């Protein structure tokens, strides 16, 4: 019995005498249950003898709680979170490890939470972007080479090649060596530009089907320009090969000059479409 006539419930874990109206130990938090015992009739206790009632202790199977113990009841040892004064209300009980004592090996075990073995946590690794895929780089290289080749041939058709037929149309003298050299250069440049332009178109289409280009309107505009430019270049070259000289050299020269202009403009449009193709491949939505 306490000094004010109430009943005390002794904690079986830490030995603290708690007020009779509490439901858990104010020091270690162990639940205190059961009705308070009925006091003995007056006269059966000797003078000055104080009865202390305690709840039967459960089997001592739980290991002690490691770490500092803080009171949770303001009536016993201050407000929550504050350490209790040294020696205030302390009763003999299981030893605890406070601040400054070495922590025993092994995980902490409490009555309220079961022991759970967890795997050691490793710091998260940040993925770093790798190099660009080789196929994407190859596609860009091919489109860039095709762009250079078509620009060169477009300039050739609109300048040196057209000048030969302009001289014919103006009845100016054109040597046989100059005409043959012009034809050889034209054949080489045409083969390179046409081959690279077709290969670039196929690569562009394959990547477009697989969703590895920007897609949308950018691809639609670029591919449409390639188609229109390719048709114009093919028509100009075909007309140039079928120039009819029966109407005279001057008329044939004028027709050939017009055909070279059509072919040159067609290759220029193809070059513009390849610029769009490079941009579309560069904005690839997913890596290959």
Image (cartoon, rainbow, N blue to C red):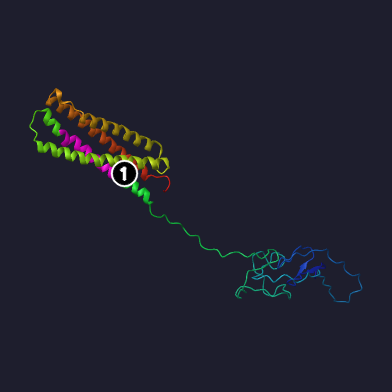
Q: Position of residue 220 (x, y in %)?
A: 37, 35
Could you tell me what secondary structure mostly forms the magenta stretch? helix
Mark 1 lies on a secondary structure that is helix
Q: Which residue occupies the foreground of this view, 94 or 274?
A: 274
Query: Which is more toward the observer, 229 or 82?
Result: 229
- Residue 97 picture quarter: bottom right
Magenta stretch holds residue 152: yes
Q: Is residue 76 left or right of residue 271?
A: right
Q: Which residue is mark 1?
A: 143
**Is 172 displayed left or right of 272 in the figure?**
left
- Percent across and percent down for residue 226 are 32, 35
The span shown in magenta is: 144-162
Q: Name the residue at 14% across, 31% down.
A: 165
Q: Quadrant of residue 205?
A: top left
Q: Is residue 242 above or below residue 48?
A: above
Q: Nearer the viewer, residue 7 or 143?
A: 143
The residue lying at 11 percent from left, 38 percent from top is 178
Instruction: Please tell me how crowded label 1 is: few (under 14), some (14-19), or many (20+) other residues with Cα within 10 Å.
Output: many
Q: What x and y, as percent, mark residue 13?
A: 74, 71
Q: Residue at x 39, y 36 (%)?
A: 217
Q: Is residue 35 above or below residue 93?
A: above
Q: Is residue 191 left or right of residue 109?
A: left
Query: Which residue is more in the foreground, 48 or 1?
Result: 1
Q: Residue furthest top?
A: 247
Report the quarter where the N terminus lies.
bottom right
- Please name the residue shown 15% across and 38% down the image: 182
Residue 75 position, x and y percent, is 72, 65
Location of residue 108 by image quarter: bottom right
Say whether residue 214 is visible. Answer: no
Which residue sits furthest front?
Answer: 246
């Amino acid at each position: 019995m306490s000094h004010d006539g109430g009943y005390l419930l002794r904690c079986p874990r830490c030995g603290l005498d708690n007020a009779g109206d509490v439901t858990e130990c104010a020091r270690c938090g162990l639940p205190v249950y059961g009705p308070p015992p009925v006091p003995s009739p007056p006269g059966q206790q000797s003078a000055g003898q104080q009865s202390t009632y305690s709840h039967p202790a459960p089997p001592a199977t739980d290991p002690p709680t490691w770490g500092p113990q803080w009171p949770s009841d303001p009536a016993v040892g201050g407000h929550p979170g504050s350490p209790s004064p040294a020696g205030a209300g302390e009763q003999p009980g299981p030893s605890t490890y406070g601040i400054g004592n070495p922590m025993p090996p092994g995980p902490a075990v409490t009555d309220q939470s079961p022991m759970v073995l967890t795997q050691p946590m490793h710091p998260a690794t940040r993925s770093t972007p790798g190099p660009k895929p080789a196929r994407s780089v190859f596609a860009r290289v091919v489109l860039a080479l095709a762009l250079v080749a078509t620009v060169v041939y477009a300039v050739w058709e609109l300048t040196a090649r057209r000048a030969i037929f302009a001289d014919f149309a103006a009845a100016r003298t054109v040597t046989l060596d100059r005409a043959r050299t012009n034809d050889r250069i034209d054949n080489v440049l045409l083969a390179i530009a046409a081959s690279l332009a077709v290969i670039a178109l196929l690569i562009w289409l394959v990547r477009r089907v697989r969703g590895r280009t920007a897609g949308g309107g950018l691809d639609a505009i670029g591919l449409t320009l390639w188609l229109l430019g390719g048709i114009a270049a093919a028509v100009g070259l075909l007309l140039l090969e079928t120039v009819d000289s029966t109407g005279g050299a001057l008329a044939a020269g004028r027709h050939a000059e017009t055909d070279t202009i059509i072919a040159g403009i067609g290759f220029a449009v193809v070059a513009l479409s390849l610029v769009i193709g490079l941009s579309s491949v560069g904005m690839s939505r997913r890596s290959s």
